[in-house]
Amino acid sequence: MPNGYEVRDFVLQVKNVSLQLGSNQILRDLSFEIKDIQRAGSTTGQIVGLLGPSGIGKTQLFRILAGLNKPDTGEVLIGNPGKPVQRGMVGVVAQHYPLFEHRTVWSNLMVAGARNGKTEGDSSRRATELLERFGLLAWKDFYPAQLSGGQRQRVAIAQQIMCSEQFLLMDEPFSGLDCVALDSVQELISEVTHANELNTTIVVSHDIAAVCEIADHVLLLGREPDEAGKQIPGAKVMASYDLCEMGLAWRKGIASEPEFHRLLDEIRQRFRLL
Ligand SMILES: Nc1ncnc2c1ncn2[C@@H]1O[C@H](COP(=O)(O)OP(=O)(O)OP(=O)(O)O)[C@@H](O)[C@H]1O
Ligand SMILES: [Mg+2]
């Protein structure tokens, strides 16, 4: 049990996923798994960062993990025993934050709560809590078109937290946020994930520091070089960092520790070769 952690059952298995779009090989035989991490004396969900350079295939993989698109080959299994993923099994915060444009912020959150089987009272309490947390209570009667990009993003994140059960997938949740909003989104992701032992959040991003600060596991997507050093088309998992095992899983102040900076430097260097 390294650093007081114990690894239990699978929460997600991605097996040999390949995807071709037109003549482009996007993902190639890509596999990874996420297991339930348990820490004595505290509830620990899993936060997994999927990092990779722009255009590598993160959003395409994200859509497959969410059950929104099917891969050409391979499968994604959720839970233990693993069930093939289907649309609706996981909460999704997409890269462009779709909201119901004809509904107010408040109504967007209430619809999400109702979809998750929450009573009106529960939905209303949770929505108030989330809007307060994100500094958006004064905007509750606004329509999405009346929000700034960052406000819209926080509503989209709040909306998914309202309706997701255990699995939450986020595509670039940190883009376009100022440092205060970034802290608040990071804290919220940690809080929501660690509220239940089996909760799992996958954050897809190219923001190495923001992801590593909250993740307990980081996977790098990239292309493998052939014998001549030429990149083979199609992304795979090229490196995997177990931050729990490295003693670098999230805790207050982690971002200012030298070991943490060494990890970021190493990932940045590898990134250039992906
Ligand atoms: N409909 C499509 N047909 C063909 N190729 C596509 C299609 N949609 C996306 N692609 C290609 O798939 C590759 C991966 O795109 P994807 O959006 O997954 O990248 P990403 O890693 O999420 O990038 P970013 O960090 O910029 O969001 C890109 O090269 C893109 O051109
Ligand atoms: Mg993307």
Image: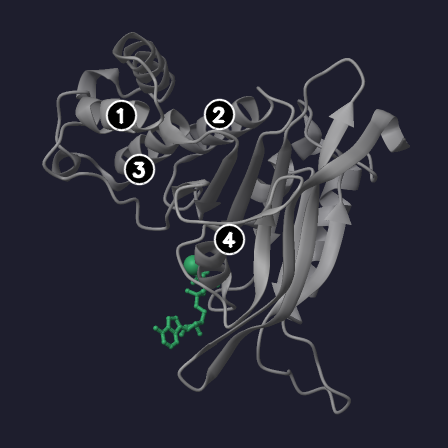
Q: CA distance from mark 3 to mark 2?
A: 15 Å
| Nearer to the camera, 157 or 138 | 157
Residue 37 in sight in this render? yes
Q: Which secondary structure lies at badge 4? A: helix
Labels 1 and 3: the sequence-earlier one: 1
Badge 2 vs badge 4, beta-carbon distance below 8 Å: no
Question: In the image, which is nearer the foreground, mark 3 or mark 2?
Answer: 2
Q: Residue 126 in the image: state x and y as whole percent.
A: 36, 14
Measure how far apart labels 1 and 3 are at the Cα level.
Answer: 17 Å
Q: Residue at x 13, y 35 (%)?
A: 146
Frontmost of labels 2 and 1 is 1
Mark 3 or mark 2, which has the lower sequence index? 3
Residue under pointer 3 = 150
Q: Quadrant of residue 242?
A: top right
- State left or right for residue 3 relative to residue 221: right
Q: Earlier in the sequence, mark 2 or mark 4?
A: 4
SS for tag 2?
Answer: helix
